[in-house]
Image: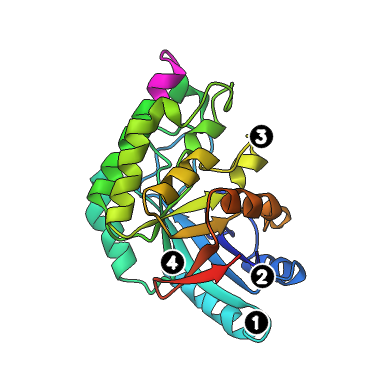
Amino acid sequence: MLSDFHLHSHYSADSETLPEDVIETAIKLGMKCICFTEHNDFEFPKNHDNFDFTLDTKAYFNELNTLKEKYSSRIDVRIGLEAGLEICFEDRINNLINNNSFDFVIGSSHLINRLDPYYPEFFENRTEKECFEEYFINILDNVKTFDNFDVYGHLDYIVRYPDTKDKYYSYSAFGDIIDEILRTLIYKGKGIEVNSGGLRCGLTFPNPHPDIIKRYKELGGEILTIGSDAHTTEYIGKYFDRIEDIIKACGFEYYTIFKNRKPEFIKL
């Protein structure tokens, strides 16, 4: 698997990595195509890290287009976005996407009702199941509302953050909601991402769980992108050998990359 379609650089507030270092590392790994997918989350609530996740699109495109041309004979560099989807910012998110020539847009849920599950406060004074249900209901609301994205990112991302990690988590416990999410995505022609960041964060699986990947396939889903969610160069393409085995076991013979928001299917 020679493409990583979820990469961050210093254009994302939670990374300090230079885009050129990402490209050089991908070339050393033998990758043929990569896509930067920098964060944008409007008015991210001030918290422990005080991050501003508003993407400077002008600077981003200026630098990436220069690097894209510089390395064009060695690797295909594509320019994408990871859009933090929140219904309260629907118009602003759509305007951001419509006014920029992204190759690829991941829709993700980083905040649930303006709260960040990355921090322990999200899980306080309620059960883990209640937190997970709120998260999946939030995703369902997002996929019903938004159309202007290509795949949904790290669909069960929240499982990375409770103290118990994935110890008590299963697809079956939330199957009704997850199935409705998947059916909505498929109806709208959207894909899902297999994100190896779950393995990096100590889970026994990528995000989403293989049971969800398999269910997406069973319901008729075909678009499956692969991303490391790397914020530093050491994680580019990390665990992709395991990812390939997982998606083959789920019935997929192809994975997907995007150019100009159009899917290209790559045989495994």
| Sequence-wise first label, 4 or 3 | 4
**Residue that protrudes farthest toward the right in the picture:** 28
- Determine whether label 1 and label 2 are within 8 Å by CB: yes
Q: Which residue is mark 3?
A: 202
Q: CA distance from mark 1 to mark 4?
A: 19 Å
Residue situated in front as seen by the camera: 212 or 107 = 212
Q: Which residue is mark 4?
A: 104
| Sequence-wise first label, 1 or 4 | 1
Residues rendered magenta in the picture: 124-132
| Sequence-wise first label, 3 or 2 | 2
Quarter assignment of residue 98: bottom left
Q: CA distance from mark 3 to mark 2?
A: 26 Å
Q: Which residue is mark 2?
A: 23
Q: Which residue is mark 1?
A: 71
Judge whether residue 24 is colored magenta.
no
| Sequence-wise first label, 4 or 2 | 2
| Sequence-wise first label, 1 or 2 | 2
- Determine whether label 1 and label 4 are within 8 Å by CB: no
Q: Amino acid at mark 1?
A: Tyr
